[in-house]
Image (cartoon, coloured by chain):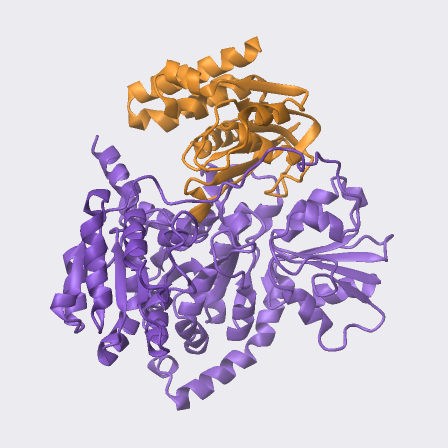
């Protein structure tokens, strides 16, 4: 579709638009705005948060489109889907595990199709810098049978996002952009292009969008029949580049997304490079791959995340007469994040000389709760309240308070996924654990804790839920929360928890003894109780104070 | 012409402010750059680092390979040591000598400084003292930027221009204080 020429040339300022210094995430956001975005939705999660942060700032300034934090990723996806149904362009962004939460609308939106351009941006976290797994979203794109871009640079993040909206409208399906931490959280320069207008309101066809089996069967067939067109788009996309070195028929490299940068990094002289296919679109561009395979004896597949391309090439029996190297063959590690050094090993080059650190005095400096954090006071009280119960179990959740797992608190025994604390404490109690305690933040509770609490109310489970209400989504930088303060208390009461067993405490050192006592009373109560530990996040309080002065 | 810099410190010390100033100065000088940083969980009082690469040629990798960095610029001495394996044999370290102790097992500071002294090209600055002299211990990041500035491929005037962009929204007093911190760091480095 010809938009990507820019990213391969030296960037020049064009049509009066200034180059900008942007995070990879922000380049996606700006690309979406310039593509004529009408609605952006997200739930905070590292490394995706900065996409919506940028959209929110821009939308406050221009008031020309909607940018809204949602209560969770599923809701965000469905809000975006509503915009697309109405014919306008929508973006939904999330971290990789957020797509698990939004998987239901995501999978089904491939069946309804997109009316206005629908772009889903998923930021994977290889190396688990701030996550509980390193799942690879390209598999989700394949699973749903939608098109996926994997940018390797900031300029591509901008250009591909613009193209993704065009492609989504052209193919009539959602399009994914797969980001990774290193691109999301890296800054570089981006040359924007003139923006275009938003779409006007035009509804989707009701028989396409009402997924009764009779319609869904027809729609699914359309999606399956469209797959060759997706492959053609991938073959033709000028974001992919195949450089064949006619002299060298031994080694060829397929490098996807930012992995291509690590390959180039190791061949500082272009003349030394073997044949390289830089791959940035999915389904994989079969024709380009075939050209490379025909030219060389050995293929090295370098990709960030799971061995997605490598697996596709291998199939069950491999390619006769060709060696395929990558993560599955052990030439590159199957876990963790790639780096120029790791890729260098895969290329079987001698390592660069470097200093050894073994003899140096270095201590680990893990992240920790801020000085004066309310969670620290809550954990101190909880630890003391549980002292006399050696069989207790505390299920925790996703947020700053997960740091309660580390010394000096050592206060929690599990953390799995959003909202799991409540359901796991219920399951634990039913298995005979006592005291069974769940610890969750206000935003995580709104995201995925309400429904399991409903189940615990219905069963009057003998457990204590502690909601740490700091009135913000703290870990990701202080996004707004949906359920805090008085509203939180009312909702819990409305859900059917006995009023006398909804206790609110102020977690401060001076209230320590009183807070221990209240926690003990509720733990001793043989039924469902909720303790709300309410005090504002110290970082947010500081920010507010600063903006007032 | 290229310069690969590891910026190091502890979450909250303001290495991203240093990065902001350098990034924008590089853009102004028409250079390509990439600057990988750490967000999210690790920012909470943990070790933080940023890979900053500036070049007149296209920059590929967001990460600097080990053994290739031209400079380690650190606001904290042990954090400087943590990344010494990134430094090229003829690279320079510009580091604070003021330890930030928020862990129980912080090593002996003399041993830490001893490790830094294994590097031939080094600028070691008492950033805490100079920042207090400028008006706030929080300005240690700009002291260190000033100390690094004679060794950067960026012009002092351009660095200062974007310091103003960064600090002026927080008031003239704040801007001046940080300018002073930069100047104190710079002259201290030129003396050493």
Residue A62 as seen in the image, left or right of residue B43 = left
Q: Which residue lies furthest to the front in this view?
A: A388
Q: In which quarter of the view is residue A395 placed?
A: bottom left
Q: Residue at x 24, y 43 (%)?
A: A509
Q: Residue furthest bottom?
A: A214
Quadrant of the image containing the N terminus of chain A? bottom right
For chain B, the rendered hue is orange
Please provide percent x and percent y for residue A166.
Answer: 47, 61
Q: Which residue is drawn at 50% across and 14% down?
A: B186
Q: Which chain is purple?
A: A
Q: Residue at x 43, y 20 (%)?
A: B128
Q: Residue at x 56, y 11 (%)?
A: B190
Q: In which quarter of the view is residue A213 placed?
A: bottom left
Q: Is residue B164 visible?
A: no
Q: Could you tell me how many numbered marks the image carries?
A: 0
Residue A489 as seen in the image, left or right of residue B83 = left
When the figure is inspected, residue B48 is found, relative to residue B30, above or below; the finding is below
Residue B50 as seen in the image, left or right of residue A474 = right
Q: In which quarter of the view is residue A40 placed?
A: bottom left
Please provide percent x and percent y for residue A117.
Answer: 42, 64
When the figure is inspected, residue A312 is found, relative to residue A359, above or below; the finding is below
Q: Is residue A411 visible?
A: yes
Q: Which residue is more in the foreground, A181 or B12?
A: B12
Residue B103 as seen in the image, left or right of residue A209 = right
Please provide percent x and percent y for residue A504.
Answer: 17, 57
Q: Which residue is more in the foreground, A432 or A349?
A: A432
Quadrant of the image containing the C terminus of chain A? top left
């Amino acid at each position: 579709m010809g938009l990507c020429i820019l990213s391969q040339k030296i960037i020049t300022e064009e049509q009066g638009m200034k180059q900008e210094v942007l995070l990879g995430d922000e380049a996606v956001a700006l690309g979406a705005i310039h593509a004529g975005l009408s609605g952006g939705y997200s739930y905070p999660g590292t490394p995706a948060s900065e996409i919506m942060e940028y959209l929110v700032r821009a939308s406050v300034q221009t008031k020309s489109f909607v940018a809204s934090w949602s209560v969770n990723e599923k809701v965000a996806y469905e809000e975006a889907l509503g915009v697309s149904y109405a014919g306008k362009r929508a973006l939904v962004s999330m971290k990789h595990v957020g797509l698990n939460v939004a998987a239901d609308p995501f999978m089904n939106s491939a069946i309804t199709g997109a009316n206005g351009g629908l772009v889903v941006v998923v930021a994977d976290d290889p190396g688990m810098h701030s996550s509980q797994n390193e799942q690879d979203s390209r598999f989700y794109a394949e699973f749903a049978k939608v098109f996926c871009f994997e940018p390797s640079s900031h300029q591509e993040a901008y250009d591909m996002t613009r193209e993704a909206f065009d492609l989504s409208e052209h193919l009539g399906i959602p399009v994914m952009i797969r980001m990774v931490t290193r691109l999301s959280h890296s800054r570089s320069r981006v040359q924007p292009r003139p923006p275009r207008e938003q779409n006007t309101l035009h509804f989707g066809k009701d028989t396409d969008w009402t997924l009764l089996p009779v319609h869904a069967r027809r729609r699914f067939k359309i999606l399956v029949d469209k797959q060759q067109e997706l492959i053609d788009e991938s073959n033709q996309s000028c974001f992919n580049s195949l450089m064949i070195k006619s002299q060298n028929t031994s080694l060829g490299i397929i490098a996807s997304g930012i992995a291509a940068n690590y390959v180039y990094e190791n061949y500082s002289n272009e003349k030394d490079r073997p044949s390289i296919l830089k791959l940035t679109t999915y389904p994989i561009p079969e024709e380009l791959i075939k050209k490379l395979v025909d030219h060389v004896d050995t293929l090295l597949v370098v990709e960030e995340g799971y061995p997605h391309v490598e697996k596709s090439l291998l199939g069950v029996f491999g390619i006769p007469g060709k060696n395929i190297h990558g993560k599955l063959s052990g030439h590159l590690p199957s876990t963790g994040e790639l780096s120029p050094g790791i890729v260098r090993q895969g290329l079987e080059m001698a390592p660069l000389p470097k200093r050894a650190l073994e003899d140096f005095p270095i201590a680990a400096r893990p992240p920790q709760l801020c000085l004066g954090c309310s969670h620290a006071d809550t954990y101190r009280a909880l630890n003391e309240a549980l002292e006399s119960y050696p069989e207790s179990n505390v299920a925790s959740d996703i947020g700053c308070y997960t740091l309660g797992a580390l010394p000096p608190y050592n206060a929690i025994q599990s953390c799995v996924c959003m909202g799991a604390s409540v359901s796991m404490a219920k399951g634990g109690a039913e298995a005979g654990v006592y005291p069974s305690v769940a610890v969750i933040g206000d935003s995580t509770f709104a995201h995925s804790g309400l429904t399991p609490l409903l189940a615990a109310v219905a069963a009057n489970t003998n457990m204590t839920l502690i909601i740490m209400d700091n009135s913000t989504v703290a870990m990701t930088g202080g996004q707004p929360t949906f359920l805090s303060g008085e509203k939180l208390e009312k909702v819990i009461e409305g859900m059917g928890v006995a009023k006398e067993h909804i206790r609110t405490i102020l977690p401060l050192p001076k209230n320590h003894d009183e807070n221990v006592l209240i926690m003990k009373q509720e733990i001793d109560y043989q039924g469902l109780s909720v303790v709300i530990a309410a005090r504002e996040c110290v970082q947010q309080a500081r920010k507010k104070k600063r903006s007032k002065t | 012409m290229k310069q690969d810099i590891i910026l190091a410190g502890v979450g909250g010390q303001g290495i991203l402010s240093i990065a902001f100033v350098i990034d924008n100065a590089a853009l102004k000088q028409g250079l390509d750059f990439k600057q990988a940083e750490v967000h999210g969980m690790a920012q909470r009082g943990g070790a933080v680092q940023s890979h900053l690469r500036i070049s007149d040629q296209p920059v590929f990798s967001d990460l600097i390979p080990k053994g290739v960095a031209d400079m380690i610029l650190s606001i904290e001495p042990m954090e400087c040591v943590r990344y010494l394996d990134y430094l090229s044999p003829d690279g320079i370290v510009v580091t604070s000598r003021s330890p930030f102790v928020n862990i129980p097992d912080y090593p002996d500071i003399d041993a830490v400084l001893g490790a830094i002294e294994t590097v031939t090209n080094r600028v070691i600055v008492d950033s805490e003292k100079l920042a207090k002299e400028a008006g706030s211990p929080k300005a240690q990041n700009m002291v260190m930027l000033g100390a690094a500035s004679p060794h950067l491929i960026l012009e002092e005037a351009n660095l200062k221009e974007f310091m103003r962009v960064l600090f002026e929204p927080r008031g003239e007093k704040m801007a001046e204080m940080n300018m002073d911190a930069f100047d104190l760091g710079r002259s201290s480095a030129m003396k050493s």
